[in-house]
Image: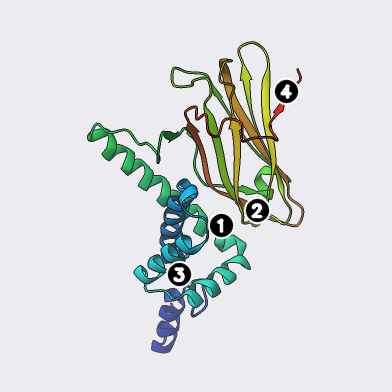
């Protein structure tokens, strides 16, 4: 058996200690924790979007989070750029981010359950989204078409006049995606809203249900065809339901009737 020289051993130890990121780039595990904190901080602004009319609150939250992680804005931006050019590594980071956020959500829900509380968003609204709040679509696994669908049948909590806000943000897409949300009523009629989901822009698609007709289900989809992209991220997904508000009931001029 051939013996290794001390210099070979030292070289092997150095190579083993080195990660896949170059010097100056935030390591993957640290980047995942940082991104998870940023997503949670921005979610506070997104949920209370009526109280924040500019980006000052979002910027202040991000600066506080960067300070907590002892990272400068320049280090974060340059690291984000490196990950953006290394999507295979970035995919692993985002999978870790999703795991972190899901674990935090489960922990919060468990703590609320033990305390006998109910997790309710700001005001008279609640997030009824039951699927992961962040998703990754890979062309190699899912094909060219990104298709995210949902359908919630009527239950005891679904009331006439409810208003639904479907929010999400797409990342790494080159073109706008098509977003659609609709309601079916028990009398056989329906209504819908459509909007384009622009890259790296928070989509807020609003559906106002009728104040008289009883809904039978609320459903929708997000559709996008990948061209040069290897993968697309859908982040900050929520479906908030708010009770009937007479002041905003007629504030949705682009809502259309469904023809069956």
Quickly name the residue at label 3: 27
Q: Earlier along the polypeptide chain: callout 3 or callout 2? A: 3
Quickly name the residue at label 1: 91
**Front residue of this view, candidates 124 and 79:** 124
Q: Secondary structure at mark 4?
A: loop
Q: Residue at x 40, y 82 (%)?
A: 9
Q: Earlier along the polypeptide chain: callout 4 or callout 1? A: 1
**Is 140 rendered above or below residue 250?**
below
Q: Earlier along the polypeptide chain: callout 4 or callout 3? A: 3
Q: Tell me, what colour scheme is on the image?
A: rainbow
In the image, farthest residue toward the top: 187
The image position of residue 132, as x and y in percent, is 49, 41
Q: Secondary structure at mark 3?
A: loop
Q: 10 Å neighbourhood of mark 3: few (<14), some, or many (≥20)?
A: some
Q: Residue at x 32, y 33 (%)?
A: 118
Quickly name the residue at label 2: 231
The N terminus, quarter of image: bottom left
Residue contact between numbered discs 2 and 1, judged by CB atoms under 8 Å: yes
In the image, farthest residue toward the left: 115
The numbered mark at residue 258 is 4
**Front residue of this view, candidates 259 and 82:** 259
């Amino acid at each position: 058996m051939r013996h290794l020289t001390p210099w070979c051993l030292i070289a092997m130890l150095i190579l083993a200690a080195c990660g896949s990121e170059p010097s100056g780039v935030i390591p993957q595990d640290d980047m995942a924790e940082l991104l998870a904190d940023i997503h949670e901080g921005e979610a506070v602004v997104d949920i209370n979007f009526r109280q924040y009319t500019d980006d000052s609150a979002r910027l202040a939250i991000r600066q506080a989070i960067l300070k907590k992680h002892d990272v400068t804005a320049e280090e974060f931006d340059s690291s984000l750029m490196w990950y953006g050019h290394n999507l295979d590594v970035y995919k692993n980071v985002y999978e870790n981010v999703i795991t972190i956020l899901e674990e935090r959500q489960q922990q919060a829900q468990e703590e609320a359950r033990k305390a006998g509380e109910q997790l309710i968003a700001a005001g008279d609204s609640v997030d009824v989204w039951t699927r992961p709040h962040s998703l990754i679509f890979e062309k190699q696994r899912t094909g060219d078409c990104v298709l995210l669908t949902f359908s919630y049948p009527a239950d005891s909590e679904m009331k006439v006049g409810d208003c639904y806000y479907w929010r999400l943000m797409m990342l790494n897409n080159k073109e706008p995606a098509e977003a659609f949300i609709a309601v079916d009523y028990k009398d056989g009629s329906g209504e819908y809203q459509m909007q384009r989901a622009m890259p790296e822009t928070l989509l807020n698609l609003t559906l106002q249900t009728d104040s008289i007709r009883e809904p039978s289900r609320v459903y929708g989809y997000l559709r996008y065809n990948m061209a040069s992209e290897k993968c697309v991220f859908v982040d900050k997904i929520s479906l908030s339901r708010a009770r009937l508000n007479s002041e905003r009931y007629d504030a949705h001029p682009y809502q259309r009737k469904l023809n069956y």
